[in-house]
Image: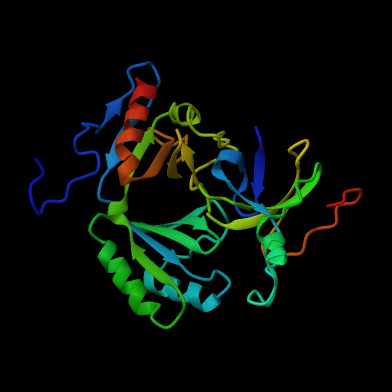
Amino acid sequence: MAEPGKIRSALAHCAIDGVVAKSGLDASISEQAFVGKVVLRGNPSDSEFLATVRGALELDLPLAPNTSSETPPVSALWLGPDEWMLICAPGSEAAVVDSLNAALAEGHSTVVDVSDAYTVLRLSGPASRTILAKGCALDLHPRAFAFGDVARTMIAKADVILHQTADETDDGGPVFDVYVARSFADYLWRWFDKIIN
Amino acid sequence: MLRIPCPWCGERDVGEFHCGGEAHIARPSGADTIDDDAWAEYLFMRQNPKGSHHERWSHAHGCRRWFHVVRDTDSDQVLAVYLMNEAPPDLPGRSS
């Protein structure tokens, strides 16, 4: 039973954390619950907009497709030519929204807190690419998809945002964060569970 | 498998896209005065060629942006991709 007034993760019922592949595939999966996610839209050719965001977050928005940028504790994922998702620590999304809204009051832009609309499945280990490739049509070879790269795509027919957050050479790497709509989280988790076990 | 080069995201699987039908169909002016035949021509009549076809596509499961594709309806080859505010490119030896 969910306790009233208590935040509950999308996969709280799945006993997902730290699941390690039993099949010999060297990978593990966990849920990064409650991560702050804010969708920002604005005109990338408007230097004033970019400067305002930089002033508010000390972060340069990534302008090249399929890339990300990071100034801890906030990172920005490129979602489209005028759309970004800002990732921040659990609970800090309201502060990010407030500071952006205050800074961008004059211009033409939108800031939306979507933290509870998505959850994050974190897939890590040397076999991660093999596991993702089972359900994703992207070229996931390290020369085509590397540390920091982002793609909005589909895994096993579920819409996801794929973000590589650690390199092959890192301890336990590579690491992929898979952002999936809350309503698809159970399905996608079960799909991963089936693939890695 | 058909692969489509999104102008922003690069080449992706066709499953990520949605086809919006024939491109460059201009809405007739004076919609309240033109006759039903002219209106039906605008609403329903499409080219359906065997060969190059100018189409609108949306990267529905990616960056969600609309763009134009020139596609050979016979070979399914993508001949050109251009933005919504751009004019169709010249494709030598091809008529549309």
Picture residue at 37% right of the left edge, 28% below the top? A191
Decide if residue B33 is in sight here: yes
Picture residue at 29% right of the left edge, 72% below the top? A98
Q: Does A68 appear above or below B49?
A: below
Answer with the quarter of the image where residue A141 lies.
Answer: top right
Rendered location of residue A153, percent (x, y): 50, 43
| Observer-nearest of B75 and A164 | B75
Question: Does residue B90 appear left or right of residue A96 in this picture?
Answer: right
Picture residue at 50% right of the left edge, 34% below the top? A136
Q: Residue furthest top?
A: A23
**Quadrant in the picture for the N terminus of chain B:** top right
Rendered location of residue A168, percent (x, y): 47, 34
Rendered location of residue B9, percent (x, y): 59, 50
Q: Does A137 appear above or below A163?
A: above
Question: Does residue A37 appear left or right of residue B38 in this picture?
Answer: left
Picture residue at 39% right of the left edge, 42% below the top? A177
Question: Does residue A169 appear left or right of residue B66 in this picture?
Answer: left
Q: Residue furthest bottom?
A: A106
Answer with the quarter of the image where residue B27 lies.
Answer: bottom right
Decide if residue A164 is in sight here: no
Q: Residue furthest front?
A: B36
